[in-house]
Amino acid sequence: MRRVVPERAADAQKLRDAVDCIPRKDPVSREDFEEYCRRFRKAFTDADAHHVGDYPPATRLLAMKRPDTFVCANGKNKGNLAEALNFAPTALSLANYWDRIIVPIQSSPWYNAPHPTGGDGELWDYRVAMLDTLYYDEDA
């Protein structure tokens, strides 16, 4: 199995710099996402040729930083996400993640509903990342 994390400190810093392109609180723009992708790919391009950085680790980092905006896409949920969001699972890539996943999610009524008060408000802040659990398929 190939590693998906850069080993050298300089490469790890490049990965941190990529994640820092995503704002902590303000809305995430397409430009923020595209700069993140550019820097994420560069962290792996500059790393050992045996390292790989594709959409599963890239989207995992995004969902960790902004669970209100991103869902981790991987082999265990990609098929169900594709069916729910109407795209071919074989066509998903980091380059089209914004159009295939973020745009349909942000266009949905549940995403645009008002923020609930009380205990449900905290869960609401993680609503997009929680799609991973809804669409996860152990057998995929």
Image (cartoon, grey):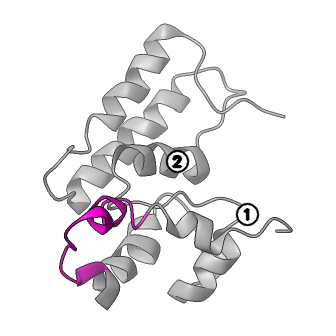
Please indicate whether residue 100 sits to the left or right of residue 8 in the image: left
Please indicate whether residue 11 sits to the left or right of residue 30 in the image: right
Examine the rendered structure and indicate whether residue 80 appears above or below residue 44: below
Q: In terms of secondary structure, where does tag 1 sit?
A: loop
Identify the residue at horizontal 57%, vertical 64% (top origin): 132
Q: Nearer the viewer, residue 135 or 85?
A: 135
Q: Is residue 29 visible?
A: yes
Q: Nearer the viewer, residue 115 or 88?
A: 115
Within 10 Å of disc 1 (Cα), the crowding (few <14, some 14-19, many 20+) is: some
Q: Do the residues bearing badges 1 and 2 touch, measured as CB atoms within 8 Å? A: no
Q: Quadrant of residue 14?
A: top left
Examine the rendered structure and indicate whether residue 26 appears above or below residue 83: above
Identify the residue at horizontal 40%, vertical 60% (top origin): 70
Q: Quadrant of the N terminus?
A: top right
Q: Which residues are magenta?
A: 111-128
- The residue type indicated by label 2 comes to Arg
Identify the residue at horizontal 72%, vertical 61% (top origin): 75
- The residue type indicated by label 1 comes to Lys
- Mark 1 highlights which residue? 76
Identify the residue at horizontal 67%, vertical 26% (top origin): 49
Which residue lies most toward the top here? Answer: 9
Q: Is residue 90 visible?
A: no
Q: Position of residue 44 (x, y in %)?
A: 54, 31
Please indicate whether residue 109 sits to the left or right of residue 95 in the image: left
- Mark 2 highlights which residue? 60
Within 10 Å of disc 2 (Cα), the crowding (few <14, some 14-19, many 20+) is: some
Q: Is residue 89 magenta?
A: no
